[in-house]
Image (spheres, grey):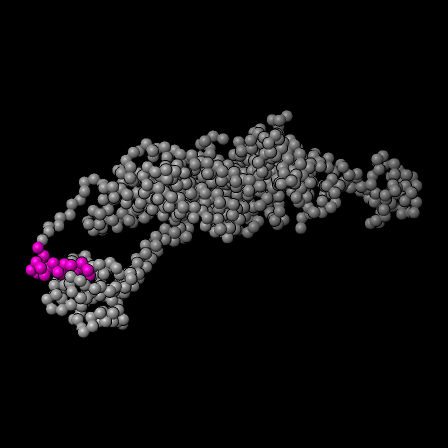
Amino acid sequence: MANDLAVSADGLVKLFGQRRVVDGVDIKVPKGSVYGVLGPNGAGKTTTLRMLLGIIEPDEGRRSLLGQSHPRDASDRVGYLPEERGLYPGMRAREAIAFLGALRGLPWKTGRKRAAALLEANGLGHAVDLKIRKLSKGMAQLVQLLGSVVHEPELIVLDEPFSGLDPVNQERLEKLVLAQRDRGATILFSTHVMAHAERLCERLSIIAGGKVRFEGTVDDARALLPLRAHYVPHHPHAGVRALLPADAVERDGGWRFIVPAGGIEPILAQAIERGYGISGLSIERPNLHEAFVKIVGREAAEAGEPA
Amino acid sequence: MSLSRGIKQTMTIARRDFTATVYTPAFLIFLLVPILMFGMGPLIGMGASDMVRNSQTKQRLVVIAAGEEATTIRALDQYGRGPTQSGNGGLPTLRIDAPQADVAAQARALFKAKDIEVRAVAFGPLDHPTIFFVPEARGLATYLSQLAEQSLRAERSGGPAPLSHATLTPVTPEKASATGQSQAAFFATLTLFVLNMMLSGQAVGTMAEERGNKVIEILAAAVPLESVFLGKLIAMFGSAVLFLLFWAVVLGNVAKLMPPAMATALAAIAPAVGPAFPWLFLAYFTLSYMLLGAVFLTAGAQAATPREIQMFSLPITIFMVLMFGFSLSAAGRPGSWQQIASEIFPFSSPFAMVARAASSPELLPHLLAIGWQLLWVAITITLGARWFRRGVLQSGSPRSGRKRR
C-alpha cells in the first residue's frame, strides 16, 4: 500500500508560536492521481505542503515523499510551484526554466532544449528569449510552472496554481496538469477555487482550521449532501403540495425539494395517479462548492471565496 | 544526499549568481571603482600638499647678525641643510637681518610681520644666543642654537668650509631585513583587509534578491539552504577573483614601468615564508572572504528591506575593522598572548596568519590555521542557514520529546 502512495502524511502538526497552524493532518496521495488540498484562506494548506516538501519541519508527525522519509532525498523527482511566485526578473524565459530544472538535477543543456519545446507547446514560443520582467504576470506564472515540470518529475506540487491567471491561462494550466497526469506524474495541488478541483481532482482533502475535515473523492464529498429535485407538474394544482416533502418550495414554475430517503419514484407515481402529470423533472446533484460549504461552514467558506 | 549532488546544487546557485553579477553594467562600474579610489587619493594628496607648501613658503627662520658672523651662519645653514632639505618641505628658509639698536624689540617685531611667518629668531653673541620661537617650533629653535654652536666652532677653527668629504655608496641587502618583514606583514594584512572591505561586503545584499522576488521558496524546496548560502558565497568570490585578476594584470603592467630604485625598495619588503607567500595570501584571502562574507550574508539574509541591509552592514563593517586592528596590533607583539589569540579567533585568524606568513618562516602553523578557518567557514554557513530557516522561513526547531521525521 505504501508503495502505491506518492505522498503520505501522518499526524502533521506545525506551531507558529502558540498557534497550531496545522493540527494533526493526515494525507495519502495515490501515485498517478490528481489530488487536491482544498480549504479557505488560512486553513493551513500552504504550511502542510511546505512541510511535505521539507521546506519547513513539522513539530509533530511523519511524512513520506515518493517513499523517502526525508523529502530532500526525493527533491530531484519533485516539481514545485509555490503560492508566492518567484523568478529572477533579469533571466530569459528559457534560462529561467533551465535553471529551475538544474536545481532539480537536470543538465542545463537538456533544460534549455526542453524549455524551448515546452514554451512552444504552451503558446509562449515568442517569449523564449524574453526576459522575465518583459512578460505579463500570467506568462511569467506559466513559465514558472513549466520550470516545475521541465525535469519530468514524478510528483508535481502546485500551491494555488490558478490564482492570478486569466480564464485562457487557467484553461491552459488545466490542460498542462492533465497532460502531466497522462505522462504518469502525480499531481498534488492546493486551491480554494472549487471549480478547478471539481474538474481535475480524483481525490481531495478539505482542510479548515489546520485540521482535515474531509478526505475522499469529489463524488464522496458531493454525497455528503442530498440530491435535489425540480418537479414541474403538467397540471399545476394546489393538491401537489400535499404530495411533496415538507421542505418543498414553489419556484421557477415548479417545485424544488430534497429527494427523500425513499427516492422520488413514489412521489411521481402519486402525481401521475392524481392526474397532475409531469411536465418537467430534473434531479440535481450538489456541486463541490456546496459540499465544501457544508464541510467547513459558511463563514469559513466565504472567507476562502476568490475575490 | 550524495556529496556530488550537493556540490552540483551549490554550483548551480553559484553559476546563476555569478552570471547575474558579472553580466551587468553595474559590474563594470564595480571593476573600475579602484580608479576612483586611486584617482581621488592623489587629488586629495595634491590638494593637501599644496596647502602645506603654500604655508611653508612663507615660513622663515631669522638670525640677527652682521658681518663675518652672518656670512659664516649662512654658509653653515646651506651646508647643514644638504640636498634633502634644500627644497620645500624641509626647514624654513633662513633670513639674516642686520641688528638694530634694540635687538630684542627687533626680534619680537618680526613675529608680527604680515608678509612672512617667522617661526624662530636668534640674536645676541654666538656663545650666549637668545632664541625666540613660536610654541610649536621648538625643533627649529634647537636648530638655530646648533647653528650658533657650529658657527662659533667654525670661527675658532678657521672658517665654515667642510673638513670631511664622505663617499656615499648604496648597498642592497641580500636577505630580507626584520624591518622589511614587518613592512611585508603590515602591507599583507592591510591589503587583505582592504580587499575584504571592498569585496566581502557585497555579500550582504545577495539574499535580498531572492527574498524580494520570492525565489527563495523555490530554492528552499529544491536545494539545502547551506548549498544556497555556499553557492552565493562562491559566486561573489568568483566575481571578486575576476576583479582581482583584472587589477593584477593592470598593476603588473604598471610595475614594469616602475623606476629601478622603487623596485629595489619594494624588494626589501620580503615575506619570511618566501615563494609560498603568494599562495598563502591567496588561501587567506579566500578564507577571510568566505568567513566575513558568510557573516555579511547571514546578517543580510535576515533583512527584509534595503534599509535593514544598510543597518546590518554597519556593525559588521565595524566588526571587520576591529578584526583588522586586533590582528595588526597583535602582529606587532610576536609571541604575545594577543598574537596567539588573534590567530585562533576565527574571524581575525586570516589577517593574523597572513601577517605571520610575512614575518615567520614556519609553514606548519599555516596548515593548521587553514584547516581551522575552513571549519569555521562551514560552521558560519551552517548557523547562517539555520538562522535563516528559523527566522525567515518560519520553521521552528522540533520540541524536545516530540516525535517527528
- Residue B131 screen position, x and y as percent: 22, 63
- Residue A130 screen position, x and y as percent: 48, 50
**Image quadrant in which you'd find residue A194:** top right
Q: How many numbered badges does the structure rendering display?
A: 0
Q: Name the residue rendered at 27%, 47% in the picture.
A: B252
Judge left or right: residue A214 versus residue A116: right
Judge left or right: residue A75 versus residue B18: right
Q: Let me know if residue B227 appears in the view.
A: no
Q: Is residue B160 magenta?
A: yes
Residue nearer the viewer, B305 or A229: B305
Q: Name the residue rendered at 26%, 61% in the picture.
A: B137
Q: Let me know if residue B41 appears in the view.
A: yes
Quadrant where the C terminus of chain B is found in the figure: top right
- Vertically, is B30 above or below B8? below
Residue nearer the viewer, A112 or B404: B404
Q: Is residue A62 magenta?
A: no
- What segment is highlighted magenta in the picture? B144-163
Magenta highlight: main SS: helix
- Residue B364 screen position, x and y as percent: 32, 32
**Image quadrant in which you'd find residue B63:** bottom left
Residue nearer the viewer, B113 or B33: B113
Residue nearer the viewer, B104 or A6: B104
